[in-house]
Image (spheres, helix red, strand yellow):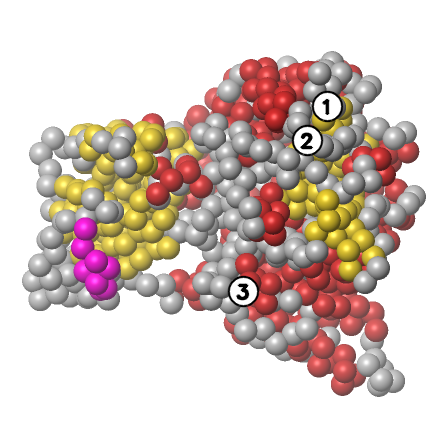
């Protein structure tokens, strides 16, 4: 018989700051929509499993947003439009509806609803449609359906909602839409009381995060970022932000106690970014336990957690324990999550039958347990800690079948148990000691998803400049008679908001929200509010999107190539005159990224591309492990008419991304699998949104150390001094995995033989 294995599920609930303090409205709807789809059903599922215990991490800013929607009557742009009479909608508002009210997972939130799908198909199959192509009633239908499909399946059988789901297009009224929003508010009002009830009954433990969700190690000591990855270029900041970090922790603990009646024992550091100084601050504030990623533990122990090809740990001992960090007579317990399981739940299992996926995870848990049979210790803890909201729409039935099957399998297994973190820690008195901790995060063990990239660094610099200005203002004016302490408080609050991790996550590469322009607007708006609050001039640079500044400094080809040959083996000097796009490591699933870097250049005859292939996608003997395809879409910038067609790849997320919705004139497709290099294909757009394959073409490529591609300008129908713009999709089997660049097309001008410059 195996030793009992304890499992701590820790579901992390977090949304960015979407609220504009200028008009008090939320610019994005995701708190409201996820509140009716994810926050309550993840809790109420426990009614079916009386022996199951779960842990939830609630970020304070999310709680504030939930209160705004539930009790303060706040709106976002989407909900405000939903309750607007359709005959009062402006053309701009109708365009917004067409662009944003289909933001839902196609497979699970559009396809099952035939009426919504009819509207979706009309919108998506005509990229050139205008606001005049839809009637006022159809706008009413679109808004109703968008809000309806975001309800969790558990709510859809309620009588009022059941009637609404049964309606046909043409039947939705203003009263219906108002009712939908009010039902959402009713659900939202149940969230916090339900969490408190389950906490008080001992069914769940709730932890929290620093109030505004900053990257704590970066606020406490920027040297930790350099230590984690010394190869990146970091901004030179002037501010000491240690006090900001302490304020974030204190505000979070105080707010939690106010709402839930007691201070939390655990604190999930934002993005699981952790350092020794972070732990010491937590200890000073009375936090009993914290959590991070297995990569941080690997670095700290200077061990490699070896896994086989399926992701099974050869020896799970080190990862299946709690740890204890001591400093100056104080201690804090640490959990380190298994990193493979969240990736499976978040990215892999949604593509499989949910019951089979749950059984696969159960088998993985049991395999770990068997490997611990000879451990000298009595207690072992498997930590499954991850985002608790963003993956479920990718599952059938919003993940209910997966979770119910998983919880049932665990609950019926007498050798397994789910535990509250604090209860487990009070029982296991043999937490393994840590005398030091290597700084890192849950992504690649460093902080490069939030700093160390040009746009991210610029955002940090703008925030730092605002903080210096604010600190100087307080020092110079705090003792004056007419000093406005409330204005200063508001300014500091805005500053803390600007330190939130989310701004830096979405700026620059590699992440793309599909709405980066809104995030950029909000970030700059909060920075401006600092200057407004203390009545100082707003710096002019805050009037321009950060991406505009960076794009002006991007590396484009400096001059045409001379005597370029495709070899796939030449040194970088061959590409010195070319442009480059460096692709930072993705948050997870690095083996899914086909290439790490793209270079491009040209001469008077051809466009050239180079792809630096990711070492994880191939091996020496068998070549490429998976079926890999690259699509390159071209848009000619010529005055003459040329047919254009929508791209042929399918976006697998619910986000509508502008580049993927535009129409293009030419398409090049390159396919690589195992050791086979298939002939490159060229297609031209034709009328009726179709593509015609061009049998004769001059497109060629070579793959040796890296992939080099030659595309004749003649094949793209580009004349001398004409511009062509393009972007690149990584899309195996025609499904978009990623695309580059994220926000704009890459321009190239075909030179004459005199080598006209870009």
Q: Nearer the viewer, residue 480 or 352?
A: 352
Q: Are marks 2 and 1 in contact (CB under 8 Å)?
A: yes
Name which quarter of the figure residue 178 lies in: top right
Q: Quadrant of the N terminus?
A: top right
Q: Residue at x 46, y 63 (%)?
A: 232
Residue 623 relative to residue 375: left or right: left
Q: Secondary structure at mark 2?
A: loop
Q: Is residue 571 magenta?
A: yes
Is 724 magenta? The answer is: no
| Residue topped by disc 3 | 226
372 sits to left or right of 553: right
Residue 297 position in % (x across, y down): 62, 47
Assign a secondary structure to mark 3. Answer: helix
What range of the chain is rendered magenta?
A: 569-577
- Taking depth in this image into account, of 143 and 588 the one nearest to the observer is 588
Residue at 82%, 81% (x, y): give it: 478
Which one is in front, 683 or 256?
Answer: 256
The label nearer to you, 2 versus 3, is 2
Look at mark 1 in the image and give the residue it sits on.
3
Q: CA distance from mark 2 to mark 3?
A: 37 Å
């Amino acid at each position: 018989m195996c030793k009992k294995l304890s499992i701590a599920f820790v579901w992390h609930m977090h949304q960015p700051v979407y609220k504009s303090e200028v008009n008090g409205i939320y610019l994005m709807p995701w708190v409201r929509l996820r509140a009716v789809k994810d926050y309550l059903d993840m809790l109420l599922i426990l009614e079916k499993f009386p022996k199951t215990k779960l842990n939830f991490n609630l970020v304070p800013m999310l709680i504030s947003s939930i209160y705004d929607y539930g009790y303060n009557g706040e709106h976002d742009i989407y909900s405000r439009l939903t309750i607007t009479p359709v005959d009062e909608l402006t053309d701009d508002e109708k365009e917004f509806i067409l662009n944003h009210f289909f933001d839902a997972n196609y497979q699970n939130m559009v396809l099952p609803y035939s009426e919504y799908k009819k509207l979706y198909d009309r919108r998506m199959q005509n990229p050139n449609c205008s606001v005049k192509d839809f009637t006022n009633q159809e706008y009413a239908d679109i808004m109703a359906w968008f809000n309806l499909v975001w309800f969790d399946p558990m709510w859809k059988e309620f009588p009022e909602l059941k009637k609404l789901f049964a309606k046909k297009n043409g039947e939705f009224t203003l009263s219906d839409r108002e009712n939908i929003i009010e039902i959402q508010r009713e659900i939202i009002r149940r969230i916090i009381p339900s969490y408190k009830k389950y906490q008080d009954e001992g069914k769940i433990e709730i932890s929290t995060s620093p109030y505004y969700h900053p990257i704590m190690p970066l606020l406490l000591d920027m040297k930790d970022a350099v230590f984690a990855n010394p190869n990146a270029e970091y901004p030179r900041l002037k501010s000491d932000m240690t006090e900001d970090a302490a304020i974030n922790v204190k505000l979070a603990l105080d707010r939690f106690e106010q709402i839930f009646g007691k201070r939390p024992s655990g604190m999930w550091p934002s993005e699981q970014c952790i350092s020794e100084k972070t732990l010491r601050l937590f200890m000073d504030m009375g936090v009993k336990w914290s959590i991070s990623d297995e990569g941080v533990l690997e670095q700290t122990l200077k061990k490699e957690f070896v896994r086989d090809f399926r992701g099974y740990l050869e020896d799970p001992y080190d990862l299946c324990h709690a740890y204890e960090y001591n400093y100056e007579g104080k201690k804090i317990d640490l959990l380190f999550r298994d990193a493979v399981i969240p990736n499976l739940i978040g990215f892999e299992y949604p593509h499989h039958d949910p019951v089979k996926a749950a059984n696969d995870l159960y088998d993985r848990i049991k395999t770990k347990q068997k490997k611990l049979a000879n451990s000298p210790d009595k207690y072992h803890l498997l930590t499954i800690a991850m985002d608790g909201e963003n993956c479920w729409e990718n599952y059938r039935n919003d993940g209910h079948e997966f979770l119910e099957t998983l919880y049932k399998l665990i609950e019926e297994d007498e050798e397994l148990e789910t535990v509250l973190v604090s209860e487990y820690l009070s029982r296991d008195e043999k937490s393994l000691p840590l005398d030091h901790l290597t700084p890192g995060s849950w992504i690649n063990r460093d902080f490069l998803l939030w700093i160390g990239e040009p746009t991210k660094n610029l955002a940090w610099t703008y925030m730092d400049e605002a903080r210096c200005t604010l600190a100087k203002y307080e020092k110079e004016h705090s003792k004056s008679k007419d000093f406005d302490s409330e204005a200063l408080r508001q300014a500091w609050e805005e500053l803390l908001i600007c330190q939130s991790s989310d701004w830096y996550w979405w700026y620059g590469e590699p992440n793309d929200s599909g709405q980066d322009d809104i995030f950029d607007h909000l970030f700059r708006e909060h920075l401006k509010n600092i200057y407004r609050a203390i009545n100082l001039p707003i710096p002019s640079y805050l009037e321009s999107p950060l991406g505009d500044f960076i794009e002006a400094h991007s590396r484009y080809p400096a001059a045409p190539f001379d005597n370029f040959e495709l070899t796939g083996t030449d040194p970088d000097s061959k590409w010195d005159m070319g442009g480059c796009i460096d692709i930072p490591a993705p948050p997870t699933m690095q083996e899914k990224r086909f290439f790490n870097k793209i270079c491009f250049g040209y001469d008077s005859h051809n466009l050239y591309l180079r792809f630096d292939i990711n070492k994880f996608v191939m091996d020496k003997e068998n070549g490429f492990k998976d079926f890999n395809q690259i699509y390159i879409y071209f848009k000619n910038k010529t005055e003459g008419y040329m047919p254009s067609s929508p791209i042929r790849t399918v976006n697998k997320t619910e986000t509508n991304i502008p580049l993927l919705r535009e129409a293009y004139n030419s398409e090049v497709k390159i396919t690589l699998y195992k050791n086979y290099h298939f002939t490159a294909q060229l297609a031209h757009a034709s009328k009726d949104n179709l593509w015609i394959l061009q049998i004769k073409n001059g497109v060629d490529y070579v793959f040796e150390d890296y992939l080099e591609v030659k595309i004749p300008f003649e094949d793209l129908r580009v004349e001398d001094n004409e511009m062509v713009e393009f972007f690149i999709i990584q899309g195996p089997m025609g499904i978009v995995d990623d695309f580059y660049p994220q926000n704009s097309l890459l321009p190239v001008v075909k030179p004459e033989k005199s080598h006209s410059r870009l």
